[in-house]
Amino acid sequence: MGGYIPSTAEQREQMLSEIGVSSVSELYSDIPEIVKLKRPLRIPKGISEQETYRELRSIAAKNKVFPTVLRGAGAYKHYIPSIVKYIAAKEEFVTAYTPYQAEISQGILQSIFEYQTMICDLTGLDVSNASVYDGASAAAEAVAMCSAPKRMRALVSSCANPEVIETIRTYGFGSGVEIVAIPEKNGATDMDELKRLADETVCCVYIQQPNFYGILESAAEAGEIAHGSGAKFIIGCNPVSLSIIQSPAECGADIAVGEGQPLGMPLSFGGPYLGFMAAKDALLRKLPGRIVGQTRDVDGKRAFVLTMQAREQHIRREKASSNICSNQALCALTASVYLAAMGPEGLREAARQCVSKAHYFSAKLCEIPGVRLRYNGEFFHEFMTDLPVSSEIVLSRLEQNGILGGLPVKGAILWCVTEAVSRKELDMAIEIVREACASLEARKES
């Protein structure tokens, strides 16, 4: 395959001559000899495109791809219209960055502007940024937005995704914000404890909706409690669910964040994904990253500009409160194409199927002797069940039949059902769980 450096040997010689040196070694003469590598890099020799393709196919074949996925916990398998991948793969869009020479990159800026607009439509909030790395970093950045000299405590629900909580704690450690866990009660955030913890030292309250256990939280009540103490209210949300449940704005949220992977991105062994952020207009200057705006050029034509970069280190130097200096532009474009292809009704239909199929699956599972819901609250497309047998036995049986079962959590299984799973697949999984439970009971009796 060709070299990564696009310039020819002759062009490099010309550049060296222009700056007055005779060789690359002379160019780096100020670098101590002790740190210079005196041997070739230990990397394989270049191979042809066909050989590279075969090698990559061989590596990819080591992955196990399940035809049926009944696991979520932060990353979800949804139906993705074919046009999404087709458009996102066009070479003019294949970049991860907001352009630095913004005015000559109108296409990328427009795609980001459209993405921001759609995120605002989903959340009901006023402004959105150009996306951050993932949902966990979005949550942590949102907490950082709210801290103030006299308010350095953040209340975070214990029912949020553990990985999100850990990321928030990591950010808080670096910035001096104390992260206080709001206890769980029956699979949801304990509102009585939230009332007790909320005081004038709290900068924000963060809850996840639906939460990690799948339960729909009393978000509006949490928002009232947060605002009653003068704190900001942050909701971490599933974007697909927002098409049928109350929006963050309707629940009183000041900031909405979440993982954008459900919006047209395959699971891809964990990434790349994107974190979306939206906020009330009053918090515009505290949003991290970039905000693209729409204007008119000198000829009166529609144009796009980088409107705001308020918190970045290359703008504010040592006073910066965020180190997010890039964005997931290609993933944001993918989300925009997905949302445009699905449309409002398509997204609502996907959400409705998630709800109906998840409730069908949970009801059928609970008909099996010894299987019951861990929590009885309302849920979107995830729920937890206790089983009369070990989770490992059930999940192993499912795996043998090409089904990735739910995630083992606290001695139970956290299941997830999306519109991508058929009723036939659900019935098959139910029978496998039924047989696994029955075989163990039969062994006990014998």
Image (cartoon, rainbow, N blue to C red):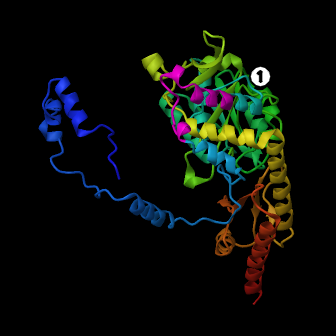
Viewer-side residue, 154 vs 329: 329
**Residue 162 percent location from the top left of the image:** 61, 47
Which of the 4 image quadrants contains residue 348?
Answer: top right
Instruction: Note whether 195 is above or below 244 in the view shown.
Output: above
> Which residue is drawn at the image coordinates 80% and 52% (left, top)?
354
> Which residue is drawn at the image coordinates 24% and 51% (left, top)?
41
Q: Residue furthest bottom?
A: 446
Q: Is residue 92 left or right of residue 50?
A: right
How packed mark 1 is, by other alpha carbons closer than 10 Å (few <14, some 14-19, many 20 or more), is some
Q: Magenta part of the protein: which range?
A: 91-116
Instruction: Note whether 48 is above or below 154 in the view shown.
Output: below
Residue linked to disc 1: 228
The reply to whether the magenta stretch includes residue 114 is yes
Viewer-side residue, 399 vs 5: 5
**Residue 177 percent location from the top left of the image:** 55, 28
> In this view of the protein, can residue 217 be seen by the observer?
no
Viewer-side residue, 31 vs 8: 8
> In this view of the protein, can residue 269 be seen by the observer?
yes
**Residue 52 percent location from the top left of the image:** 40, 60
Instruction: Note whether 69 is above or below 83 in the view shown.
Output: below
**Residue 94 percent location from the top left of the image:** 53, 40
Q: Amino acid at mark 1?
A: Gly
The reply to whether the magenta stretch includes residue 106 is yes
Which of the 4 image quadrants contains residue 373?
Answer: bottom right
Viewer-side residue, 168 vs 287: 287
- Locate the C terminus by quadrant: bottom right
Secondary-structure class at tag 1: helix
> Which residue is drawn at the image coordinates 18% and 40% (left, top)?
35
Magenta part, dominant SS: helix
